Every structure is written in structure tokens, then in C-alpha cells.
Amino acid sequence: MASACAWSVALVGLEGRIVEVEADIGAGLPRTVLVGLPDSALYQSRDRCKAAVSNSGHEWPISLLTINLSPATLPKAGSHYDLAIVAAVLAAQRVFGAEQLRRTVLLGELGLDGRLRPVRGILPATLAAQQAGFPRVIVPLRQAGEAKLVEGIDVFGIASITQLVAFLQGVPLPPIEPVEVMGERVGQHANRRLDLADVVGQVEAKWACEVAAAGRHHMLFHGPPGVGKTMLAERVPGLLPDLEVRDALEVSAVHSLAGFNLADELITRPPYSDPHHSASVASIVGGGQRMARPGAISCAHKGVLFLDEAPEFQPAVIEALRTPLESGMITLGRSEVHARFPARFQLILAANPCPCGQAATPGGHCQCSPMVVRRYAEKISGPIRDRIDINQAFLPLRKAYLKAALQRAESSAVVAERVREARDRQDRRLAGSGWQTNGEVSGTYLRRHLPLPDGLQAVDEAVDRGRLSARGVDKVLRLAWTIADLAGRDVPGRDELAIALAMRRGEQPGAVKREAIGP
Amino acid sequence: MVATESKKQIGVRGEDLACAELERQGMQVLERNWRCRLGEIDIVAAEAAPTGLTLVFCEVKCRGLGFGHPLEAITYTKMRTLRQLAALWMREHRMRASSIRLDAIGVVLQPGREPSLTHVRAVG
């Protein structure tokens, strides 16, 4: 009898695939059949759409209505197909011309009264529509701002079915009262103004943060409680330069998918994610039953992931970070589909040396037995430690130092400027290589395409003594390059290499300077 | 009692209209309201097709608007029962046909308006 089709988007990870929504009004007893591997949220779309259409003054066909979501083999999840389904059904009844839907992607969930509600992932879905060559996308009014962040596609925000019909019929939109939405997650990226100058002392740790920020190196902070590990980690994102446009789009898309409200602007600052140590593996790496959602590591993409009290995390959580630390992405396999999310985060771990926190601290009295101290340290496994570039020990402050340090604390702005200069040097050097920072550059590229620094024998010695793995050599080289970039030198020398080696090994404060001055 | 009576009247009126519609389409009504232990067949009709005789078993639903379209009240369980009833009817009447068909007719009665009929062929 009558049929029509509309277009929507299925999100698999961050990747959007165009879905054709067909509605066919055929002969048979009144019944609505929804086919094309819907999940339960989508299957219930049938009942939502039916009520929404009736309550908007239109008719739901009294015959056998078949709705097909094609490609039929791709599993589909979520409530954002409602709008496309309703549009296809109304077009099949010739409420408006079916040709109106031909070059339009529709996204949005319906309320029973016919009003449109916001959904997750509008940004990546709009991006997919634009890449597929669609010139127009219709989204819930409240999310028009988010969709408009994508260039090269016309975005129309509508509030209800009544408005959709008017829009597609080409008549002026009737007004409608705004939808109140409860329980929306507000963007975590709200720029928190934390200044490095607030942290008293810990000059060396601050410098380690500067190096880490400049080259995107992973760090492990260890030291007794109350010396400023958490405070410093929180201030690292403030040292990072703004995200490039391409990265900003990617980061925003992940946050959109994770359900954060983007508040009509791209996330341009590096994100910061600090999950509590009770977190599950799925919440960290991403998860979900049939379709995966991004986890904390993807929300920290191009930003900082801070795991405070790292030994308190379940070992499986920390171990799960191994592959994404290397590859910069995570592929989650689920029964129906494999989802891939970007996860190029900068890891900062913080740990106490032992359960009481005083082991190996000058002036501290550790109450723990040696076995307990060892077990505590072992909670961060060797493979994870091997992936850390900078091991930074924190020492408790002395009173005299507290006073002296108060006057000459550098602000984040000053440090961020040096970091930006170091990044500029890296950009020039790595132009065309596909990498942005020293921390990401592959070992092969480091050794083959960049000049090797002087004094490599110190590194070789460390390898011979079994103190440095092959990966460790690359880490030291990368660190040396970043230190040279910060110092404004073209090639790292003997000194930079020595400092890098010391930072990697996590020697006690003071040792760094000694080695740096050495022959 | 009055309400029940009027419901029955509505049903009978709907079936009258349905019979008229089937006859208008060239079918011959063989029996109405045939009952047995399983239930009731509203209309049995015969249609002469080029390939032979087709027996049509028809379920009629009649109501005023306000509770949804009458056809929506014809469930698939009902149609399954109708299929069993059709077999029983044919055994009892020792009838043979080249094919059988199950139809549904929805009748909407609205005061002050012509009744509207929806005839859906071959539903079960």
C-alpha cells in the first residue's frame, strides 16, 4: 500500500553509521512490527511513537504497520530513532511529502505528549550525517547548539511533532512551551581555575609536572599523605595548552556520547578525569551490556586521568590500562558489536609508600611490617610501572621551607607559557609524523629519524644492569627530548639524558641535581 | 440489562452491515453466528473464484469510537480460534473447498454519521 523512509544514525563507539528507517502500511490486522535488531529501549519506541502521534493530532495507521531499520544486521540501541520512525510513518500517510525526508537525518526521543527530548551522542551522530553527505539534520531544540558545532551541515532544532510536521510542510512553526529536563549531567569540563602557586614547596615535583605537561608523559607520585600529590595532579590540566580543533571535536564527541551536556560549545580545554578507587573495570575502560559506552579513560582522552590512591584500586582496573596506555584507544567487544573509543590519556598515579604512609619518609615512623609494605607496593604491577615515564617522590615540607617557598611560587600561567613553547618545538620537529608530543612518538621513530643524544652509554649501562627495559630506554629518550624542548635546546645532551634517567628511576630529590652536574 | 441488550443490538447491527458488504462484493452468506463449544463464527460466506470455491470465515467487530478502532480488538489469539472453528464447521457440514480464507471486518458506529466499514482480507 503506502511506504516511506527517513534517515537516522546508529552509533557504534564514536563511529556513526547511517540507518534507513522504512515504514510500510500494509494489509492486515492493526499491529505495529518493529524489525532490524532493536534493543529494548528502541523496541519500546513503538509505543512511545504511537502515543506521541495520537496526542499530536495525527493518526497512527489502523492496519499492519511494518517499521524496518536498515541495515538489518547492525544492532541498534537507544531512543533517538523515535523522530525518524514518526517521520517515516507520517510520510507514509502523506501528511507531508516523502521527498522532504530524502536528504535529512532525524534524531530525538519522543515524550508521550509528542514533545522532543534530548538524547546522547548528538555531536558524533551529526558528524556522521555530515560525513555521509547529508545537507540537513533535525535535532531536539535544546541540542541544536551542540549539533551546530559541526560545520557543513544545516541544523534545525524543533520541539515537538507538531513543529516537525509544520517544518516539513513548509508552514510557520507553532510555538510550544519549553521542555523541562531533569537529571542532566552538566559538563565536567567547566574550567576549574586551579593555580600552581597554591601548592607550597615541592619545587621539584612541580618541575616534573611541567615536563609531563610539555611532553605528555605518564607520572607516578609517591610519598606520605598530605604533601600535595592530589593538589599537584589537579593542576596539571591547567598547564596543558588548549586542544586543537580536531581534538576538541573528538573530545566533545566522546563527552556527548557519555551523556555530558556540552552547553553549546566545544570542549577546548584538556579534560580531567579522577575516578574514585572503588571504580569498576567497566566504568574505567567503558562498558555496557550490548552496546559499549565510553569510560573514564575515554573521557580523559587528550587530557589527564588521575588515579588517586592507586594501590587501593582493584588490580584488574589498573591492569586494564595497559593496552590503552600503549595504543591510545580501546576496543570493547560485546556480544553484538565491537566498539572503539579513543583513549589517549595522560596517566597520573598517586600512591603512599605503605598503608600507614610513612615508609621511606625521612622523619616518619612506619608501623607496617616489611611484608605489608612490599605487598602494598606490588599492587601497582611491574608492567604498569614500566609504562610510567616519571617517578616522582614527594617529601614532607620543613617549616623553614614552607616560609621560603611562599614567596617564589610560580603561577600556572607562567609555567603553561613554557609548556606551550616546548610544544611548539615538538610540533615543528614532529610535523608530518602523525604525532603531536614526545610522549606519543614511537620508539622506532625516536631512534631512526631523530638524532641520538650524547652520552647514551649511561642508558646502555642501566640496561645492562637490568634497571631499564627496552621500553624504558624509549621512555628515557622521550623524556630527554622534552627536557631539551623546555630548555630551548635543539638536541638533548648528556645532561638532559642524565636528568631523564633519574626522573624515570625516581631517585630521591637531590639526586637529580647531582647527576645533572656530573661529568 | 439495558446496557447488555444495547451491546447485543450493536453487534447484530454490525453483522448485518458486514453481511451486506460481503454480498455486495459478490459473496454468498452461508451461515451466521454458528456456535460450538470452542466459540462462535460470526459469518461464513462462499466466494466463487476461477480456481474453485473459497470459503470465507469472517470475524466482525463493531463499536463506537472512543475505545480505539474495532479492528484493534481483533487479536491474533482470536484469529487462531477462528481457524480452529473453521475446521470444525467444515467437518460438521461435510464441506470441501479449494481454499479457505479468514477475514476481519471492523464497523465504526457514530451517532449522526454513516457507519464506516473496514474489510481486511486474509488476516490469519
Image (cartoon, coloured by chain):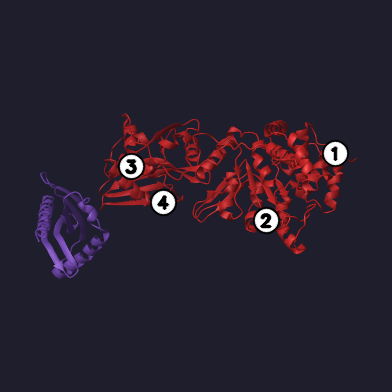
Chain colours: A red, B purple
**Residue bearing mark 2:** A311
Q: Amino acid at mark 3?
A: Gly
The mark lying in front, picked from 4 and 3, is: 3
Q: Using the image, determine if residue A519 lies above or below residue A371.
A: above
For mark 1, does the 10 Å Cα neighbourhood hold few (<14), some (14 to 19), or many (20 or more) residues?
some
Q: Position of residue A250 (x, y in %)?
A: 56, 39
For the residues labelled 1 and 3, say whether their Cβ atoms are less than 8 Å apart.
Answer: no
The answer as to whether the residues below labels 4 and 3 share one chain is yes
- Whole-angstrom CA distance, mark 2 to mark 1, is 35 Å
**Residue bearing mark 4:** A41
Going from the N terminus, do you reach mark 2 or mark 4 first?
4
What chain letter is assigned to the residue under label 3? A
Whether residue A239 appears in this view of the structure is: yes
Q: Amino acid at mark 4?
A: Ala
Q: Nearer the viewer, residue A308 or B110?
A: A308
- Whole-angstrom CA distance, mark 2 to mark 4, is 38 Å
